[in-house]
Image: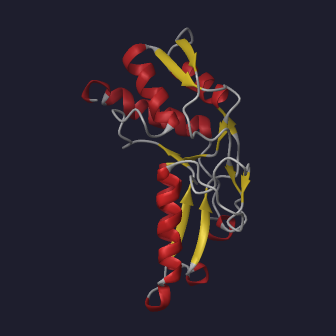
Amino acid sequence: MSVYGDSIIKANTKAVCKPLSYYGLHKKLSEDYIVKNSNNFNFIIFRIFNVYGPGQDLSNEKQGMVSIYLASLLKKNKIIVKGSLNRFRDLIYIDDVAEIWVEAIKNKKIQNKIINLGTGKKTKVIEIIEILKELHFKKSKIIIKKNTPGDQHGIYSDKSIIKFIYKRKFVNTKKGFKKFYNWAKKIEFNF
């Protein structure tokens, strides 16, 4: 989803992409290269939104808002927020992502398409923090700092294509956070 930039709030795959970072720019260039050179092969390009869940690298403090906050909460009983609490993300649980990939491989109708992989639901930073605090310790300290340059204020997926691939309900955010939290507690001292 980093290909979209900050000018789009509800991201549709037909929108003009204006990446804010080198990371987003390289994702977009890779997509363009695949599409341009796809005469001899089929492809599916997923623009994946904010994935979270068991197996995520909790020691990586630069990737995944939910895992960054959860790791900080477990290690230091505090969360450092860089930017507004009103920013929002489209959060998707890892099991949903894996199941969608499997479904996509079997579905010939979506070959040679670019597809948003998100729930289509906005979750504000303040909501993420409140759910994590409920799971861990309600009196955890929240520190708000200046935003990270190149960070999107908010973006969520237009899920008009994904709903034809994935007929099940997405994992509820609270349920997904609880699974992630319980997994992280077991490996807490290993990161």
Place of residue 176 in the rendered image (x, y in percent of width and height, measured from the top left) = 54, 40
Look at the image and name its color scheme: secondary structure
**Residue drawn where x is 48% and y is 76% of the image:** 34
Is residue 177 at least partly visible in the picture?
yes
| Above or below, 40 relative to 171 | below
Which quarter of the picture shows residue 12? bottom right
The number of callouts visible is 0
Residue 43, given in percent of the width and then of the height, sits at 49, 78
- Residue 182, quarter of the rendered image: top left
**Please, is residue 37 above or below residue 181 in the view?**
below
Of the 4 image quadrants, the one containing the C terminus is top left
**Closest to the observer, 178 or 67:** 67
Residue at horizontal 40 percent and vertical 42 percent from the top: 54
- Residue 143 is situated, as x and y percent measured from the top left of the image, at 55, 14
Instruction: Judge from the rendering whether residue 7 lies leftward or rightward of residue 131; answer left or right.
Output: right
Is residue 105 among the parts visible in the rendering? no
* Depth check, front residue: 169 or 116: 116
Residue that lies at the very extreme toward the top in this rendered image: 139
User: x and y percent of residue 128 in the render?
Assistant: 60, 30
Drawn side of residue 123 relative to residue 129, left or right: right
Q: In which quarter of the image is the N terminus?
A: bottom right
- Compared with 74, 31 (above or below) is below
Q: Quadrant of residue 87?
A: top right
**Of the pair 161 and 27, the residue shown nearer to us:** 27
- Quick one: which residue is furthest to the left in this view? 190
